[in-house]
Amino acid sequence: MKKFLLGLVAAVAAGTSFGATVNVTSTGNYTTIQNYTNCTTVPASLCANFLTTHNVSGSFTTAGALPANAANLEIGSTVTSYSFSNGLDTVASTDTNARLNTLRISTDASGNITSVNVMQIVLWQSGTAPHTAGNRFAAFVVAGTNGTSTHNSSCATTGTGNSGVTDTCLTATVTDTSRSTGNNSPVSVSMAAAPVATTAAIPTLSEWGLILMASLLGMFGIARLRRQR
Protein backbone atom coordinates (compact mmCIF):
# COMPACT_ATOMS: atom_id res chain seq x y z
CA MET A 1 0.00 0.00 0.00
CA LYS A 2 2.74 2.45 1.02
CA LYS A 3 4.72 1.71 -2.15
CA PHE A 4 1.64 2.28 -4.25
CA LEU A 5 0.93 5.67 -2.70
CA LEU A 6 4.55 6.75 -3.09
CA GLY A 7 4.42 5.74 -6.73
CA LEU A 8 1.22 7.72 -7.22
CA VAL A 9 2.73 10.85 -5.68
CA ALA A 10 5.91 10.43 -7.75
CA ALA A 11 3.87 10.13 -10.94
CA VAL A 12 2.03 13.36 -10.17
CA ALA A 13 5.28 15.17 -9.34
CA ALA A 14 6.93 13.88 -12.53
CA GLY A 15 4.21 15.58 -14.58
CA THR A 16 5.51 18.99 -13.49
CA SER A 17 7.76 20.59 -16.14
CA PHE A 18 8.83 24.11 -17.03
CA GLY A 19 9.26 25.67 -20.44
CA ALA A 20 12.20 27.76 -21.56
CA THR A 21 11.96 31.53 -22.03
CA VAL A 22 14.37 33.30 -24.37
CA ASN A 23 14.86 37.06 -24.28
CA VAL A 24 15.76 38.91 -27.47
CA THR A 25 17.27 42.19 -26.27
CA SER A 26 18.00 45.25 -28.39
CA THR A 27 21.61 46.40 -28.28
CA GLY A 28 21.10 49.21 -30.78
CA ASN A 29 18.60 50.93 -33.08
CA TYR A 30 17.96 50.62 -36.81
CA THR A 31 20.89 51.87 -38.82
CA THR A 32 19.14 51.71 -42.20
CA ILE A 33 15.56 52.89 -42.71
CA GLN A 34 13.47 52.89 -45.87
CA ASN A 35 10.16 54.59 -45.17
CA TYR A 36 7.17 54.74 -47.50
CA THR A 37 7.44 57.08 -50.46
CA ASN A 38 3.87 57.11 -51.78
CA CYS A 39 1.04 56.07 -49.50
CA THR A 40 -1.74 54.43 -51.50
CA THR A 41 -3.09 52.36 -48.61
CA VAL A 42 -6.70 52.65 -47.52
CA PRO A 43 -6.89 53.83 -44.83
CA ALA A 44 -3.88 56.10 -45.23
CA SER A 45 -3.33 56.00 -41.46
CA LEU A 46 -1.63 52.61 -41.93
CA CYS A 47 1.36 54.38 -43.47
CA ALA A 48 3.94 55.30 -40.83
CA ASN A 49 7.66 56.01 -40.52
CA PHE A 50 10.29 54.06 -38.62
CA LEU A 51 12.63 56.25 -36.59
CA THR A 52 16.31 55.96 -35.79
CA THR A 53 15.27 55.48 -32.14
CA HIS A 54 13.32 52.31 -32.98
CA ASN A 55 14.57 48.74 -32.61
CA VAL A 56 13.50 45.09 -32.25
CA SER A 57 13.06 43.36 -28.89
CA GLY A 58 10.89 40.72 -27.23
CA SER A 59 10.79 37.18 -25.91
CA PHE A 60 9.32 33.74 -26.54
CA THR A 61 8.53 30.73 -24.35
CA THR A 62 8.50 27.06 -25.34
CA ALA A 63 6.47 24.18 -23.92
CA GLY A 64 9.57 22.42 -22.59
CA ALA A 65 13.31 22.83 -22.21
CA LEU A 66 15.32 23.63 -25.33
CA PRO A 67 17.10 20.59 -26.80
CA ALA A 68 20.86 20.36 -26.27
CA ASN A 69 23.28 20.83 -29.19
CA ALA A 70 20.58 22.07 -31.54
CA ALA A 71 21.90 23.41 -34.84
CA ASN A 72 19.52 25.62 -36.82
CA LEU A 73 16.58 23.59 -35.48
CA GLU A 74 12.98 24.60 -36.26
CA ILE A 75 11.07 24.85 -32.96
CA GLY A 76 8.21 27.13 -33.96
CA SER A 77 5.57 24.51 -33.22
CA THR A 78 6.75 24.22 -29.59
CA VAL A 79 6.33 27.93 -28.79
CA THR A 80 3.50 28.59 -26.34
CA SER A 81 3.77 32.38 -26.15
CA TYR A 82 5.70 35.31 -27.58
CA SER A 83 5.70 39.09 -27.59
CA PHE A 84 7.78 41.47 -29.74
CA SER A 85 7.99 45.16 -30.52
CA ASN A 86 9.59 46.92 -33.48
CA GLY A 87 8.98 50.57 -32.66
CA LEU A 88 5.79 50.92 -34.68
CA ASP A 89 4.01 47.68 -33.90
CA THR A 90 3.67 45.21 -31.04
CA VAL A 91 2.77 41.60 -31.68
CA ALA A 92 1.77 38.94 -29.17
CA SER A 93 0.76 35.30 -29.47
CA THR A 94 -2.62 36.18 -27.96
CA ASP A 95 -3.43 38.32 -31.01
CA THR A 96 -5.60 36.43 -33.51
CA ASN A 97 -3.81 38.27 -36.33
CA ALA A 98 -0.34 37.10 -35.24
CA ARG A 99 1.49 34.29 -37.06
CA LEU A 100 4.84 32.77 -36.05
CA ASN A 101 6.09 31.68 -39.47
CA THR A 102 9.39 30.17 -38.41
CA LEU A 103 11.78 29.96 -35.47
CA ARG A 104 15.12 28.19 -35.92
CA ILE A 105 17.61 28.14 -33.06
CA SER A 106 20.99 26.76 -31.98
CA THR A 107 21.94 25.73 -28.43
CA ASP A 108 24.96 24.54 -26.46
CA ALA A 109 25.48 21.19 -24.73
CA SER A 110 23.37 22.33 -21.77
CA GLY A 111 20.42 23.42 -23.91
CA ASN A 112 21.14 27.13 -23.51
CA ILE A 113 20.34 29.38 -26.45
CA THR A 114 23.34 30.43 -28.52
CA SER A 115 21.57 31.86 -31.56
CA VAL A 116 18.19 32.66 -33.01
CA ASN A 117 19.18 31.69 -36.52
CA VAL A 118 15.93 32.86 -38.08
CA MET A 119 12.68 34.08 -36.55
CA GLN A 120 9.84 35.59 -38.56
CA ILE A 121 6.54 36.78 -37.11
CA VAL A 122 3.72 38.22 -39.22
CA LEU A 123 1.02 40.54 -37.90
CA TRP A 124 -1.90 40.99 -40.27
CA GLN A 125 -2.96 44.65 -40.45
CA SER A 126 -5.81 44.34 -42.94
CA GLY A 127 -8.16 41.73 -44.31
CA THR A 128 -9.77 38.75 -42.58
CA ALA A 129 -9.02 35.04 -42.49
CA PRO A 130 -8.44 33.45 -44.87
CA HIS A 131 -6.14 36.27 -45.97
CA THR A 132 -5.26 36.86 -49.60
CA ALA A 133 -2.56 38.56 -51.64
CA GLY A 134 -2.79 42.32 -51.26
CA ASN A 135 -3.68 42.25 -47.57
CA ARG A 136 -1.35 44.37 -45.43
CA PHE A 137 0.95 43.08 -42.69
CA ALA A 138 3.83 43.94 -40.38
CA ALA A 139 6.81 41.60 -39.99
CA PHE A 140 9.30 41.04 -37.18
CA VAL A 141 12.51 39.29 -38.23
CA VAL A 142 15.56 38.23 -36.23
CA ALA A 143 18.51 36.61 -38.02
CA GLY A 144 21.47 35.98 -35.78
CA THR A 145 22.37 39.30 -34.18
CA ASN A 146 20.32 41.40 -36.59
CA GLY A 147 16.73 42.60 -36.26
CA THR A 148 14.63 43.78 -39.21
CA SER A 149 11.02 44.97 -39.41
CA THR A 150 8.47 45.99 -41.97
CA HIS A 151 5.24 47.91 -41.45
CA ASN A 152 2.18 48.09 -43.71
CA SER A 153 3.62 45.76 -46.32
CA SER A 154 1.54 44.24 -49.11
CA CYS A 155 1.48 40.45 -49.06
CA ALA A 156 2.34 38.73 -52.33
CA THR A 157 1.95 35.07 -51.31
CA THR A 158 -0.06 33.45 -48.51
CA GLY A 159 0.29 29.90 -47.21
CA THR A 160 1.67 27.77 -44.39
CA GLY A 161 4.84 28.72 -42.49
CA ASN A 162 7.70 26.38 -41.57
CA SER A 163 6.33 26.19 -38.03
CA GLY A 164 3.07 24.76 -39.37
CA VAL A 165 1.03 27.94 -38.85
CA THR A 166 -1.56 28.53 -41.57
CA ASP A 167 -3.07 31.65 -43.12
CA THR A 168 0.17 33.60 -43.02
CA CYS A 169 2.11 35.76 -45.45
CA LEU A 170 5.14 34.08 -46.99
CA THR A 171 6.44 36.79 -49.33
CA ALA A 172 5.95 40.55 -49.66
CA THR A 173 5.55 42.81 -52.67
CA VAL A 174 9.01 44.41 -52.86
CA THR A 175 7.85 47.27 -55.10
CA ASP A 176 5.26 48.40 -52.53
CA THR A 177 5.65 52.17 -52.03
CA SER A 178 3.36 52.24 -48.98
CA ARG A 179 5.47 50.07 -46.72
CA SER A 180 8.26 51.10 -44.35
CA THR A 181 11.28 48.99 -43.38
CA GLY A 182 13.79 49.23 -40.55
CA ASN A 183 17.03 47.27 -40.93
CA ASN A 184 20.13 46.34 -38.96
CA SER A 185 18.87 46.62 -35.39
CA PRO A 186 21.49 44.64 -33.39
CA VAL A 187 20.14 42.18 -30.82
CA SER A 188 21.45 39.67 -28.28
CA VAL A 189 19.75 36.51 -26.99
CA SER A 190 19.74 35.02 -23.50
CA MET A 191 17.88 32.52 -21.37
CA ALA A 192 15.49 33.92 -18.77
CA ALA A 193 15.92 32.60 -15.23
CA ALA A 194 14.14 29.29 -14.77
CA PRO A 195 11.15 29.39 -12.40
CA VAL A 196 11.89 28.10 -8.91
CA ALA A 197 9.51 25.51 -7.51
CA THR A 198 8.45 25.96 -3.89
CA THR A 199 8.13 23.16 -1.35
CA ALA A 200 4.41 23.77 -1.05
CA ALA A 201 3.91 23.37 -4.78
CA ILE A 202 5.58 19.93 -5.13
CA PRO A 203 3.87 17.60 -5.13
CA THR A 204 0.30 18.78 -5.48
CA LEU A 205 -2.77 16.71 -6.14
CA SER A 206 -5.84 17.92 -7.92
CA GLU A 207 -9.28 17.50 -6.42
CA TRP A 208 -9.83 14.41 -8.57
CA GLY A 209 -6.48 13.03 -7.43
CA LEU A 210 -7.51 13.36 -3.79
CA ILE A 211 -10.85 11.66 -4.49
CA LEU A 212 -9.04 8.81 -6.24
CA MET A 213 -6.60 8.39 -3.37
CA ALA A 214 -9.41 8.38 -0.79
CA SER A 215 -11.29 5.73 -2.78
CA LEU A 216 -8.20 3.53 -3.03
CA LEU A 217 -7.56 3.84 0.71
CA GLY A 218 -11.13 2.76 1.37
CA MET A 219 -10.83 -0.25 -0.94
CA PHE A 220 -7.59 -1.39 0.70
CA GLY A 221 -9.11 -0.94 4.16
CA ILE A 222 -12.12 -3.11 3.33
CA ALA A 223 -9.91 -5.80 1.83
CA ARG A 224 -7.72 -5.86 4.92
CA LEU A 225 -10.71 -6.22 7.26
CA ARG A 226 -11.97 -9.17 5.23
CA ARG A 227 -8.60 -10.90 5.48
CA GLN A 228 -8.55 -10.42 9.27
CA ARG A 229 -11.94 -12.10 9.61
Image (spheres, grey):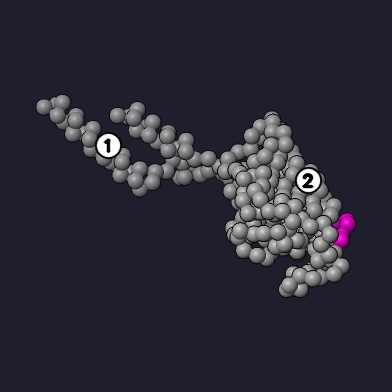
Amino acid marked by disc 1: Leu
Residue that appears at 63% across and 38% down: 66
Q: Is residue 55 visible?
A: no
Q: Position of residue 215 (x, y in %)?
A: 26, 40
Residue that appears at 38% across and 31% down: 7
**Magenta stretch, overall SS:** loop
Task: Please identify the quadrant where the N terminus is shown.
Answer: top left
Q: Is residue 226 visible?
A: yes
Per the image, label 1 sits on a secondary structure element best described as: helix
Give the numbered dot on residue 143: 2
Q: Position of residue 110 (x, y in %)?
A: 67, 32
The region drawn magenta spans 27-34
For residue 94, above or below residue 217: below
Which is more N-terminal, label 2 or label 1? 2
Q: Residue tagged by mark 1?
A: 216
In the orientation shown, which residue stands out farthest toward the left? 229
179 part of magenta stretch: no
Task: Please identify the quadrant where the C terminus is shown.
Answer: top left
Amino acid marked by disc 2: Ala
Snapshot quadrant of residue 204:
top left
Q: Report how far apart the C-alphas of labels 1 and 2 lie in the structure.
A: 55 Å
Give the numbered dot on residue 97: none
In the displayed structure, does residue 228 sit left or right of residue 17?
A: left
Snapshot quadrant of residue 195:
top right
Q: Position of residue 48 (x, y in %)?
A: 79, 68
* Crowding at mark 2 (Cα within 10 Å: few <14, some 14-19, many 20+): some
